[in-house]
Every structure is written in structure tokens, then in C-alpha cells.
Image (cartoon, grey):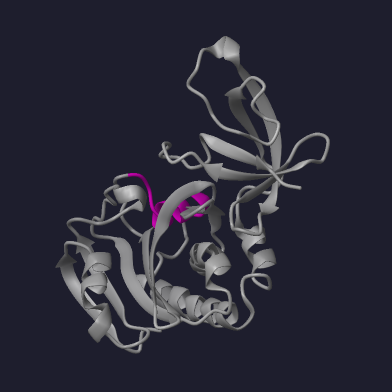
């Protein structure tokens, strides 16, 4: 990836540009911007993109054997490409370093001619202290003599790892990559508390906005990913549940809905 490398000082959105020109761009094309004026985040949110961020969108076409069951895992392949570089993954697509959010990924996929066309948008706060913090600041706090992160070298590392992960995913699916993914994510054995309507947890349950006296609190432990790419959790008795977002919460770890697995 990156054999065709496009660069620009400023652009509304690298993702939108690549979506508009996918048909004419070669396989593996990458667009890097110093600034975005209309950067995209998950759910249509704005991604603040000041100078100092590493921001790019890369294109890859994937041919997978069982597209219907593999689509959800493409997002995890992308996050693994970054999380595997001494960073952590907050499900589903946030990137953390030393416990602090420093970036995220936005994936756009289309299915044409028996292949997924995948646009991978990644933003990492490298040297911009605003609006939150960045890799340079965190490393300086850990060690005053720490060298500053080189954006170009970081881009090469991410693209190299991303290409390798995509190659493995295309040949073997997500199963061989899952242990690496789980070693980088932040949720192993994490306990989550769901609020549900009383009596509604026999087969499935959900967060509820009803009166407090009509809700019950259920504690589950996250143990991995379900076969369909959602969170896999167990209760105190060992019963497995699949946890999915309710679609209403900005933080997808909030407002989870559980489905009992046989």
C-alpha cells in the first residue's frame, strides 16, 4: 500500500475525496493531508483535524470467501494495524496510547464484483497538543528526553502493518489475527453493567429509559468477540451473551444490548 501516494496541505476530507475517486484510483492508493476542514468521525461526527495530526485514507480491494460474516471484522483488521504498534484498541475503532485516546479509524466498505472495496481512514494525534493531547506530549511526560514521533515513519509503519494484516485476512479470515487483536484491545475481562427492564432478560435484553424501579442491573464480563464480530460476554453462571450497541450512544460501550447465545 502507498505505491501511489497523494499528499495535500489541506482538504475537506480525505475519506470523501477517496470515495469520490475510487473508480479511477489504483489499488493501494493513499491520500495524506496535513489538515482537514471537514474531517469525518464515526456516526457522522466531526473529526477535529489540526496541523500535527497524521491523517490519511488508504484504499484496498479484498476478496474474502464468506463476505456476509467477514464484513464486521474488516474494522478490527484496521485497528489491529495501529494497535499492534504499541497502542491499544477501544472497541470498536478508537486508538489509545498509555490509556489516553490519541486517534481513531473510520472504515467505508462497498461490495462490487465479488470484492470489498475498503477505504481506511485513520487519524492519529502526533504533535498537536490540542484539542486533547498527542503522542509527543504523552511520551514527553513519560520521559523528558524522548524523541519526537516522526509522522512519515509512523505512516510507513502503519501502512506496512495494514497491508500485512489485510493479506492475512484475505487468505485466512480473521481467526488467525484475533489473538493479536485481543492482545491489543482494552476490554479483556472488563465488567460492564447493563440496565434492563425487569423480566426482559430471558433471551435478550436492552438498556431502558423506563422508570428506575422497573429496571434491573446486570453485570457481565467481556471475554472476546462473537462469531459475528460483536462483543462476547458471560454472566456469573457462565452463560454467554452477544453485546451489540443500541445505536443511540456516542460511546458504543454504553447502552449495550445483550442477546443470549445457545
Residues 11 and 26: in front is 26
* Horizontal side, residue 167 vs residue 225: left or right: left
Residue 56, x across and y down, in percent: 32, 69
Does residue 85 appear in this view?
no
Image quarter (top left, top right, bottom left or bottom right) of the N terminus: bottom left
Using the image, determine if residue 104 lies above or below residue 11: above
In the image, what residue occupies the spot 71% across and 31% down?
202
Q: Residue 16: image x %, image y %? A: 23, 66
Which residue corresponds to the image point at 62% horizontal and 63% vertical from the top-left? 181
Q: Which residue is at a point 59% across and 52% down the rendered structure image?
A: 230
In percent of the image, x 76 and y 36: which residue is there? 235
Residue 162 visible to an observer of this rendering: yes
Magenta residue check for 133:
yes
Task: From this view, report whether residue 172 is shown above or below residue 233.
Answer: below
| Residue segment shown in magenta | 132-143
**213 in relation to 120, above or below:** above
Observer-nearest of 225 and 50: 225
**Depth check, front residue: 105 or 88:** 105
69 vs 54, left or right, is right
Give the farthest residue toward the top. 213
Amino acid at each position: 500500500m502507498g505505491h501511489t501516494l497523494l499528499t495535500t496541505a489541506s482538504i475537506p476530507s480525505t475519506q470523501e475525496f477517496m470515495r469520490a475517486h475510487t473508480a479511477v484510483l489504483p489499488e493501494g492508493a493513499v491520500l495524506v493531508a496535513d489538515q482537514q476542514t471537514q474531517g469525518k468521525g464515526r456516526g457522522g461526527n466531526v473529526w477535529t483535524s489540526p496541523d500535527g495530526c497524521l491523517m490519511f485514507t488508504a484504499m484496498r480491494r479484498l476478496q474474502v470467501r464468506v463476505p456476509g460474516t467477514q464484513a464486521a471484522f474488516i474494522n478490527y483488521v484496521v485497528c489491529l494495524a495501529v494497535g499492534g504498534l504499541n497502542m491499544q484498541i477501544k472497541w470498536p475503532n478508537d486508538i489509545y496510547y498509555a490509556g489516553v485516546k490519541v486517534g481513531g479509524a473510520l472504515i467505508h466498505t462497498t461490495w462490487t464484483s465479488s470484492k470489498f472495496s475498503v477505504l481506511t481512514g485513520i487519524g492519529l494525534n502526533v504533535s498537536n497538543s490540542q484539542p486533547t493531547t498527542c503522542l509527543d506530549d504523552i511520551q514527553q511526560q513519560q520521559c523528558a528526553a524522548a524523541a519526537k514521533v516522526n509522522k512519515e515513519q509512523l505512516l510507513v509503519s502503519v501502512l506496512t502493518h495494514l497491508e500485512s494484516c489485510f493479506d492475512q485476512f484475505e487468505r485466512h479470515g480473521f481467526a488467525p489475527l484475533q489473538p493479536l487483536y485481543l492482545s491489543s484491545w482494552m476490554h479483556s475481562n472488563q465488567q460492564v453493567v447493563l440496565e434492563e427492564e425487569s423480566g426482559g432478560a430471558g433471551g435478550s435484553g436492552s438498556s431502558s429509559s423506563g422508570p428506575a424501579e422497573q429496571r434491573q442491573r446486570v453485570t457481565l464480563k467481556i471475554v472476546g468477540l462473537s462469531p459475528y464480530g460483536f462483543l462476547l460476554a458471560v454472566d456469573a453462571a457462565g452463560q454467554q451473551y452477544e453485546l451489540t450497541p443500541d445505536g443511540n450512544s456516542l460511546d458504543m460501550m454504553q447502552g449495550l444490548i445483550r442477546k443470549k447465545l445457545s
